[in-house]
Every structure is written in C-alpha cells, then in structure tokens.
Image (cartoon, grey):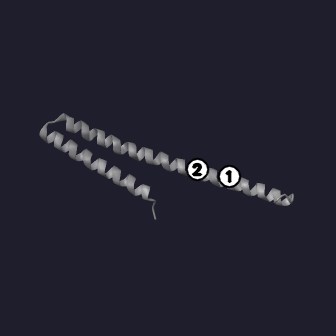
C-alpha cells in the first residue's frame, strides 16, 4: 500500500498538468497571452511538485537511516550497561 501523500502529490501533478494544457489551448484559440502564461506557470508548478516530492522522499529515507543508527547505538549502550551490572 502506498502512503497517502504519494496519491495527493500524483493528483496535484495531474491536476496542474490538465490546467496547463487547457489554459494553453484556450489561450491559443482565443489569442490571449495571459492564459498561455497561466498554462506555463501551471506546467512549471507541476514540475516543482515532482522535484519537491523527490526531495521530501530523500529526506525521509535519511531520517529512517539515522533513526536505525540511533537505535543501534542505544542497544549498544544497553548491552554495555548490562555487562557492567548497572541496569537499575
């Protein structure tokens, strides 16, 4: 099962790309440059969501690795205390 955040990010990218296509299309049909620029901004925003999502996932992976490292250190300290009979 995928985390709900991924579904939200996928929906946001899809929605922004749909808006981009429609705005550019209507802008070209109606010869309105403001709509075309709006479509370009939506497309760029979709790209930004993808890049930020990847950055977020890398940060979560790093946090998981650090959490496991800390857990190993705590277990090492516990073993040391048991060996020295200091486990009050």
Disc number at residue 59?
Answer: none
Residue 25, image x, y percentages: 19, 44
Q: Residue furthest front?
A: 88
Q: Which residue is mark 2?
A: 63
Residue 68, above or below 1: above
Q: Which residue sits furthest right? A: 84
The answer to which of 74 and 38 lies nearer the viewer is: 74
The x, y position of residue 3, in whole percent, is 46, 59
Q: What's the residue at 86%, 60% (across, down)?
A: 85
Percent position of residue 1, x then y: 46, 65
Label 1 crowd bin: few (<14), some (14–19), many (20+), radius 10 Å? few
**Closer to the camera in the image, 30 or 79:** 79
SS label for mark 1 = helix
Q: Quadrant of residue 45?
A: top left
Considering the image in quadrants, where does the C terminus appear? Answer: bottom right
Give the farthest residue toward the bottom: 1
Q: Is residue 13 left or right of residue 22?
A: right
Residue shown at the point (33%, 40%) measured from the top left: 44
Identify the secondary structure beneath mark 2: helix
The disc, 2 or 1, on the residue closer to the chain's N-terminal end is 2
Does residue 23 appear to the left or right of 78 in the view shown?
left
Q: Circle 1 sits on which residue?
A: 70
Marks 2 and 1, Cα distance to the nearest angstrom? 10 Å
Left-right relation of 47 to 34: right
């Amino acid at each position: 099962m995928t985390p709900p955040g991924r579904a939200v990010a996928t929906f946001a990218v899809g929605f922004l790309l749909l808006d981009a296509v429609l705005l550019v299309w209507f802008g070209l049909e109606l010869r309105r440059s403001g709509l075309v620029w709006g479509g370009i901004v939506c497309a760029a925003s979709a790209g930004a969501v993808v890049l930020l999502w990847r950055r977020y996932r890398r940060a979560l992976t790093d946090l998981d690795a650090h959490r496991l490292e800390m857990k190993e250190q705590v277990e090492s300290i516990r073993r040391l205390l048991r060996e020295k009979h200091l486990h009050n």
